Image (cartoon, grey):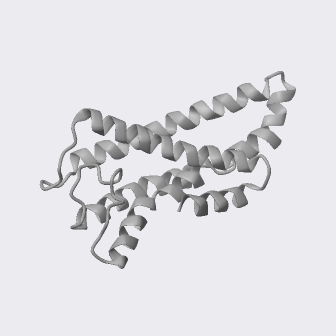
Amino acid sequence: MKNNTFDKLLIAVIVPVQFFLIRNEASFDLALPFLSELTSADTIAGNMFLIMYAYLPFPFFLLYFSGKMRNLTEQYGLLITIRGNRKDRLVLMLMGKTLFVVIGIAGTMGILYTIGRKEQWIIFDKTLQTQGIILYTATITLLIQMQFLLELYMESHYAFGITTLWGV
């Protein structure tokens, strides 16, 4: 089984890096810019940077969940299935754990951006913030579910690469 300590450390580092990159960029004017950063910039290079800032943490989220479905269906999951557990129940438990972790990550990012916001950022009301974080969570969860689906048919690193490129 894969040790996720390094992957957790990468996520713990990349989220503040994204925050400081966005905070130092002058073109962001809305609160929670990780939700709304795909706006138009003045130059082509500016658009590239905005997209890069938006997509920066996604590969690290996918790396954290990489190989979990493969492990469940081929390696450790076979031992659990032999002991009497059903595969559909194991997959649903994995999906629940995944959703729980993604909600925690998105909530942490929301709190980080709310506490460290700039004064000139336009503040959303609570319903828009909640809707934005729910949609961000759904986007990350969709990418992870796509990676899980691909892991059923191919190796984990190929599924990670395809999902990362498709997410761009």
Give above or below for 74 relative to 51: above
Res 147 visible: yes
Give above or below for 48 relative to 69: below
Q: Residue at x 72, y 50 (%)?
A: 150
User: Number of callouts in the render?
Assistant: 0
**Left of 142 or right of it: where is 161?**
right
Which one is in front, 87 or 11? 87
Q: Residue at x 65, y 62 (%)?
A: 161
Which one is in front, 2 or 39? 39
Res 107 visible: no
**Left of 31 or right of it: where is 48?**
right
Residue 59 image position (x, y, % from top left)? 54, 58
Residue 48 quadrant: bottom left
Residue furthest to the right in view is: 82
Q: Residue at x 66, y 29 (%)?
A: 92
Q: Residue at x 35, y 36 (%)?
A: 131
Residue 53 image position (x, y, % from top left)? 38, 64
Residue 156 quadrant: bottom right
Residue 69 quadrant: top right
Residue 154 image position (x, y, % from top left)? 79, 54
Residue furthest to the left in view is: 119
Residue 133 image position (x, y, % from top left)? 37, 40
